[in-house]
Amino acid sequence: MIMERTGLPGLGISHVLTTREGNRLGIVSHLDGRQVLVLYDRTEPEQAVGSVTLRPNDARTVADVLHATVTVDHVADLVEPAEGVRAARIRIRAGSTYAGRPLGDTRARSRTGASIVSVLRGAEVNAAPGPDFVLRAGDVVVAVGHEDGLVRLRDLLAAAC
């Protein structure tokens, strides 16, 4: 598969995926959190034949279906972006070593270099959770760090008992 990534100033980021069979799928990540899936014509690769707009929660559901464990957030116009620093959402899966354990047990920052800044539990946002905050299966950890640290954090939180 080939992936093309293009910044869209003032709009967001476009990713276009081309499969080995020549099918093209575009994903436009808007700055406001919307995602638009675009299907391109096989004979006219630059012509869209259809699109589906997803709200942020819908996009996360699709990512879960595709077994994505890290969703990179593009937070723009809130602060000046720091070089290489990203935000990610990591779902705590059933069977994770840390499901049912306090956040402090992860020692996430010292082990991965990524910082957990909040935990989403359904519609509830737990901003700046302390080390005694108990993680549950289904929680979504929001973390910031460099990409390699976020990958290490994802692997740490995904480790099975």
Image: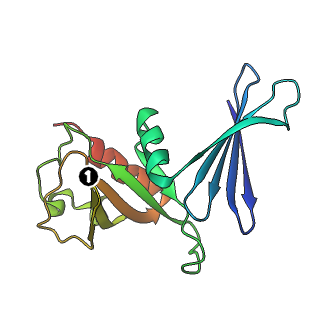
Front residue of 97/21: it is 21
Q: Residue at x 18, y 55 (%)?
A: 135
In the rendered structure, the answer to whether residue 32 lies left or right of residue 150 reads right
Reading the image, the residue beneath label 1 is: 139
With respect to residue 161, does 137 lie above or below? below
Q: Residue at x 41, y 39 (%)?
A: 64
Corner quadrant of residue 89: bottom left
With respect to residue 1, does 31 lie above or below? below
On the image, the x and y values in percent for residue 78 come to 54, 79
On the image, the x and y values in percent for residue 39 come to 71, 34
On the image, the x and y values in percent for residue 138 come to 25, 46
Q: Residue at x 21, y 36 (%)?
A: 160
- Most extreme residue toward the right, as rendered? 44
In the rendered structure, the answer to whether residue 43 lies left or right of residue 88 reads right
Quadrant in the picture for the C terminus: top left
Q: Amino acid at mark 1?
A: Asp
- Most extreme residue toward the bottom, as rendered? 79
Answer whether residue 149 is visible to the viewer in this image. Answer: no
Mark 1 Cα shell of 10 Å, populated few (<14), some (14-19), many (≥20): many
- Numbered-mark total: 1
Front residue of 25/132: it is 25
Answer whether residue 102 is visible to the viewer in this image. Answer: yes
Quadrant in the picture for the N terminus: top right
Corner quadrant of residue 94: top left
Front residue of 42/143: it is 42
Q: Residue at x 30, y 67 (%)?
A: 118
Q: Secondary structure at mark 1?
A: loop
On the image, the x and y values in percent for residue 84 come to 56, 66
